[in-house]
Each structure stands twice: as structure tokens, then as C-alpha cells.
Image (tube, helix red, strand yellow):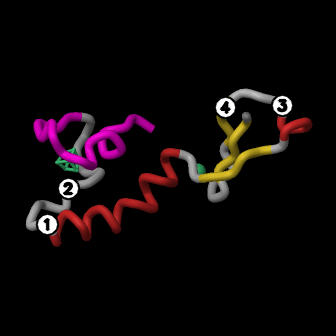
Amino acid sequence: MKFQCIRCQITWGEGNPEIEGYSHGLCKYCLKEALTPLYRNRQTKEGNFDCFGKACGFCDQYTCKYRDLCLSNI
Ligand code: SF4
Ligand SMILES: [Zn+2]
């Protein structure tokens, strides 16, 4: 299935959109951008630094629940 981001229109995945059409959603970049204020707000409420998305590819907080998306290379 071929995917198309509803925000930036970028496409990814395999398949023939002329036959199957596109499946729509947010690409990783737009998802991260959309979730950043929400996650930072949560981190503050949890009594932590609002550091989501601020690490430059490395963070020593290995159990952080936001880690996968936070450190994803887009
Ligand atoms: S992975 Fe590190 S920088 Fe990212 S949200 Fe978690 S603690 Fe913050
Ligand atoms: Zn996008």
C-alpha cells in the first residue's frame, strides 16, 4: 500500500496508487511536529523537563516512553 501524508503530501510505501489508491495519514515528520506540544505539555505535568524532540540524536534516558519518536531520524 502506498501512503500519502495529509499535511505535506509526501508519499511512502509500496504499491500502485492508480489501482489501490492512497492510504492517508501523517508522515513521521508531521506526526512528530503535531505531537511535540502535546508531549512537552505532558512531560511538564509529569514533573520532567519538556525535552521531547530537543535531543540531537542521543539521550541517556533509555526508559523514556517518548524515546522512539523523539530520537527518530526523519
Ligand atoms: S528520549 Fe530523552 S530527550 Fe527525548 S523525550 Fe525522552 S528524555 Fe527527553
Ligand atoms: Zn508529512
Secondary structure of residue under mark 4: strand
Where residue 7 is drawn, which disc sits there? none
**Is residue 55 shown left or right of residue 33?**
left
Asked if the stretch drawn in magenta spans residue 64, the answer is yes
Q: Identify whether 65 is placed above or below 44.
A: above
What residue span does the magenta drawing correspond to? 58-74
**Is residue 55 shown left or right of residue 8?**
left
Give the spatial CA distance, label 2 vs label 4. 30 Å
For ligand 1, tell me if the residue under mark 2 lies within 8 Å: yes
Q: Main secondary structure of the magenta part?
A: loop
- Kind of residue indicated by mark 2: Cys
Q: Read off the residue under disc 1.
A: 46
Q: Residue at x 30, y 62 (%)?
A: 39
Q: Alpha-carbon neighbours of circle 3 within 10 Å: few (<14), some, or many (≥20)?
A: few
Q: Residue at x 24, y 47 (%)?
A: 65
Front disc: 1 or 2: 1
Q: Residue at x 73, y 34 (%)?
A: 1
Q: Read off the residue under disc 3.
A: 16
Q: Read off the residue under disc 2.
A: 51
Give the spatial CA distance, label 4 vs label 3. 10 Å
Give the spatial CA distance, label 2 vs label 3. 39 Å
Q: Residue at x 34, y 67 (%)?
A: 37
Asked if the stretch drawn in magenta spans residue 62, the answer is yes
For ligand 2, tell me if the residue under mark 4 lies within 8 Å: no
